Image (cartoon, rainbow, N blue to C red):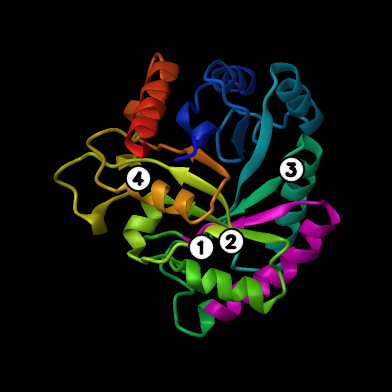
Amino acid sequence: MSHPVFALNHMVAPGLSPRKFFELAKSLGLKDVEIRNDLGGNAIMDGTDASEVKALADEVGVRIATINALQRFNDWSPEREKEAIELADYARDVGAKALVLVPVNDGTGQRDGERQANLRSALKGLKPILEQRGLIGYVEPLGFEVCSLRSKREAVEAIQAVGGEERFKLVHDTFHHHLAGEPELFPAMTGLVHISGVTDPDVTVSAMRDPHRVLVDAEDRLGNIEQMRALIDQGYDGAFSFEPFAEEVQQLENPAEAVRDSMDGIRAGLV
């Protein structure tokens, strides 16, 4: 089993400044980081210029893999297009490789036929925006029952329908994969994997939400190790990015130690 390549999403420690976050990744021997546009007082939201964030990453010695994320991307409109252009400009200027695309997740746009048409329309609109800036769009299906894009197969079919194989990849999120209950993996179409675990023994799968998502450990109920092993066995060689949302992780005084323990446990489990 080849060694997995790990990355860090800023959600691991959202209270850290960009510099401290980059230094955390570097201290763990990691090269790739994901920055976010939904963290108050941090980088994008506080108006820090992209060139400044890029200079910080270069100075610390990490790469910005993605900006996470263009929300409601499959509800395409002039307003969404404007938002996509601004975020894509920032992603290009910060030196990111990709922009994560998150679908509508409020119970709307779910009807059969409607959701596929909405998805294709959004991908068609996004394709030239991404092409002009040399970016990849990472489409992230969410497993929540209210989500307008739960199926990776549906995402792949839409990407192929718009001739977007060079411009779009999937995010395989281990949490959302478990919730969606879709057995198929699409390693060749996968650009990034988000990893997090759920250890609460009492929560049902349909009731699992972001605050349940902790670092992957021996008590994990989502089958992270099995999912990672299957992806690697089927040829996936990209990064596995830690993306926990649980407050008990985000408020850790020593996140480096916790992430290191998780990485060690995953490596041992994959042997």
Which residue is at 55% across, 15% downward? 27
Tell me which numbered mark, 3 or 4, is placed earlier along the sequence.
3
Query: Left or right of 84: which side holds 179?
Result: left
Q: Secondary structure at mark 1?
A: loop
Measured Cα–Cα span from mark 2 to mark 1: 5 Å
- Point out the stretch of residues depicted in magenta: 116-141
Question: Which residue matches tag 1?
Answer: 186
Can residue 72 be seen here? The reply is no
Please say whether residue 130 is one of the residues in the magenta stretch: yes
Measured Cα–Cα span from mark 4 to mark 2: 19 Å
From the viewer's perspective, is the residue at label 3 or at label 2 nearer? 2
Q: Is residue 185 above or below residue 226?
A: below
Query: Residue 193's spot in the image, x, y percent?
Result: 50, 47
Question: Which residue matches tag 2?
Answer: 189
Amino acid residing under circle 3 = Ala
Which residue is at 61% across, 40% downward? 37
Amino acid residing under circle 1 = Phe
- Asked if the residues shown at circle 2 and circle 1 are in contact, with their CB atoms under 8 angstroms apart, the answer is yes
Question: Which residue matches tag 4?
Answer: 224
Tell me which numbered mark, 1 or 3, is placed earlier along the sequence.
3
Q: Secondary structure at mark 4?
A: helix
Question: Which residue matches tag 3?
Answer: 91
